[in-house]
């Protein structure tokens, strides 16, 4: 029985509970034991003259040992939650070594992060840390429901590729039966193939790998990508879907008041539609407000932060220059230097996407203009030779979305076992 199910309505009933020893205190002939599971805690009060065998076993207990207790539920106004357990039997399922590597309940936010992540198995027992993952689960479930309601089909694309996903250098190279292969940093090439050749509204939620040597609070080497691709639309056709994902995620998170209270956070309501501001307007805005920027550059982290400060609400930046767009992005008709790439800024870059180039000959030209050899993308280019439909899409990081909405101090907080430049264990 879960501890959260035990209340005054169970008074007088015999129950069996399981959990971890959060605290134990023995005073003379009375012992108080606090047991914790994933959802709650409960007090066990043992009198030596009522349960002498249990009392002797309690003396062997250490903090974080795993136990099972059989006992009777009793109302007790001074006990936490107004009830306690009077024990009949105590079984020590697995004793914990002492001392603990660190106390997971002592000011966890100010505990050294490396210590916490080294001993993540203990860190995750803290209800406030565990709250991140209850929120993550709820958010993902809600967004999945939204995607199905909107007519999207969930696909799974390869995570081992014969060429890098986007022609970049930030990829992990592996040996694939004697051939060089790469871990996917996005489903870019295959999601285009699916949307453009089947007419299916594509989405996928899955791990990806990026070999960026970044040590910021927003970067992971292994992350969960949330990718969307829609046939027969331009970038404007996918913006409402991206807005919907962010709004549904925010609305769902705000329902979980217990977890938000544990984390001491409030989530403001997200209003849609988001603002749309062109790349050219953003460059002008930065130059007018003391942050010089040359046209044709990509935005730095500091420039994104400045734009957020000036606009102070989620917004799309559209019509990026071709100089910073990927080879598969469609150009803007009548604007030789512009592309149909976009970013969503929500405090920082939250998502990026584009109207894709679906014409074979133009894709070959784009590759050559980027200094890439079309022969290295031969299997990808085959997707576009036999009537590939126009399509657009985007990708965002699930962890970054959650961390942004709940103002987490570090994206690693919302990953059970984070993988970064410096961390490959536990």
Image: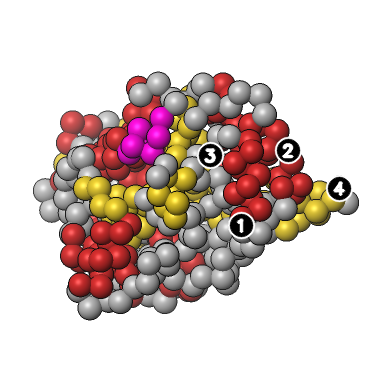
Q: Which residues are magenta?
A: 233-239
Of the image marks 1 and 4, the number of the one nearer the N terminus:
4
Residue at x 37% of width, y 50% of height: 319
Residue linked to disc 4: 177
Number of other residues with Cα within 10 Å of mark 3, as a class: few under 14, some 14 to 19, many 20 or more: many
Q: Identify the image's colour scheme: rainbow, by chain, secondary structure or one colour.
A: secondary structure
From the image, state whether disc 3 or disc 2 is nearer to you: 3
The correct choice, above or below, for 284 with respect to 226 in the image is below
Q: Nearer the viewer, mark 1 or mark 4?
A: 1
Direction from residue 147 to residue 419 in the image, left or right: right
Residue sitting at the far front: 334
Image label count: 4
Mark 1: few/some/many CA within 10 Å (<14, 14-19, 20+): some
Q: Position of residue 156 (x, y in %)?
A: 59, 33
Element type at mark 2: helix
Give the Cα separation between the discs numbered 4 and 2: 19 Å
Q: Where residue 298 is drawn, which disc sits there?
A: none
Q: Quadrant of residue 272?
A: top left
Q: Residue at x 61, y 23 (%)?
A: 387
Is residue 140 shown left or right of residue 47? Answer: right
Q: Nearer the viewer, mark 4 or mark 3?
A: 3
Q: Are marks 3 and 2 in contact (CB under 8 Å)?
A: no
Res 357 label: 3
What's the CA distance linking mark 1 and mark 4?
30 Å
Quickly name the residue at label 1. Answer: 370
Q: Nearer the viewer, residue 198 or 39?
A: 198
Q: Which residue is mark 2?
A: 379
From the viewer's perspective, is 172 left or right of 65? Answer: right
Q: Report helix, strand or loop for mark 4.
A: loop
Task: Give the residue drawn at x 25%, y 70%.
Answer: 286
The residue drawn where x is 49% and y is 43% is 330
In front here: 300 or 8? 300
């Amino acid at each position: 029985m879960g501890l959260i199910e035990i209340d005054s309505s169970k008074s007088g009933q015999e129950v069996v509970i399981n959990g971890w020893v959060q605290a134990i205190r023995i005073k003379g002939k009375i012992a108080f034991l606090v047991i914790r599971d994933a959802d709650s805690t409960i007090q066990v009060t043992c009198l030596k003259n009522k349960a002498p065998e249990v009392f002797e076993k309690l003396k062997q207990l250490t903090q974080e040992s795993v136990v099972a207790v059989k006992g009777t539920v009793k109302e007790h106004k001074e006990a936490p939650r107004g009830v306690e357990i009077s024990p009949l039997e105590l079984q020590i399922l697995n004793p914990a070594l002492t001392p603990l590597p660190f106390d997971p309940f002592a000011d966890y936010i100010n505990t050294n992060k490396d210590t916490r992540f080294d001993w993540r198995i203990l860190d995750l027992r803290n209800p406030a840390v565990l709250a991140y993952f209850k929120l993550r689960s709820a958010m993902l479930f809600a967004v999945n429901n939204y995607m199905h309601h909107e007519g999207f089909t969930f696909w799974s694309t390869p995570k081992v590729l014969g060429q890098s996903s986007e022609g970049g250098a930030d990829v992990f190279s592996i040996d694939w039966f004697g051939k060089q292969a790469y871990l996917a940093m996005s489903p870019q090439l295959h999601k285009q193939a699916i949307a453009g050749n089947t007419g299916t509204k594509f989405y996928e939620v899955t791990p990806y790998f990026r070999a960026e040597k970044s040590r910021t609070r927003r970067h992971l080497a292994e992350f969960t990508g949330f990718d969307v691709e829609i046939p027969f639309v331009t970038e404007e056709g996918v913006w409402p879907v991206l807005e919907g994902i962010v709004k549904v995620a925010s609305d769902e998170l705000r329902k979980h008041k217990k977890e938000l209270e544990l984390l001491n956070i409030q989530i403001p309501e997200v209003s849609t539609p988001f603002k749309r501001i062109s790349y050219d307007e953003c460059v002008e805005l930065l130059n007018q407000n003391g942050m010089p920027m040359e046209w044709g550059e990509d935005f730095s982290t500091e420039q994104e932060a400045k734009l957020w400060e000036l606009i102070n609400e989620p917004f799309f930046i559209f019509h990026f220059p071709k100089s910073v767009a990927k080879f598969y992005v469609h150009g803007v008709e009548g604007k030789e230097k512009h592309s149909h790439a976009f970013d969503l800024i929500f405090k920082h870059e939250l998502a990026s996407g584009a109207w894709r180039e679906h014409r074979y000959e133009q894709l070959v030209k784009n590759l050559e203009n980027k200094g890439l050899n079309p022969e290295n993308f031969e299997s990808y280019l085959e997707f576009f030779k036999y009537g590939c439909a126009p399509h657009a899409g985007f990708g965002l990081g699930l962890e970054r979305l959650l961390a942004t909405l709940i103002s987490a101090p570090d994206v690693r907080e919302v990953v059970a076992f984070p993988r970064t430049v410096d961390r490959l264990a536990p």
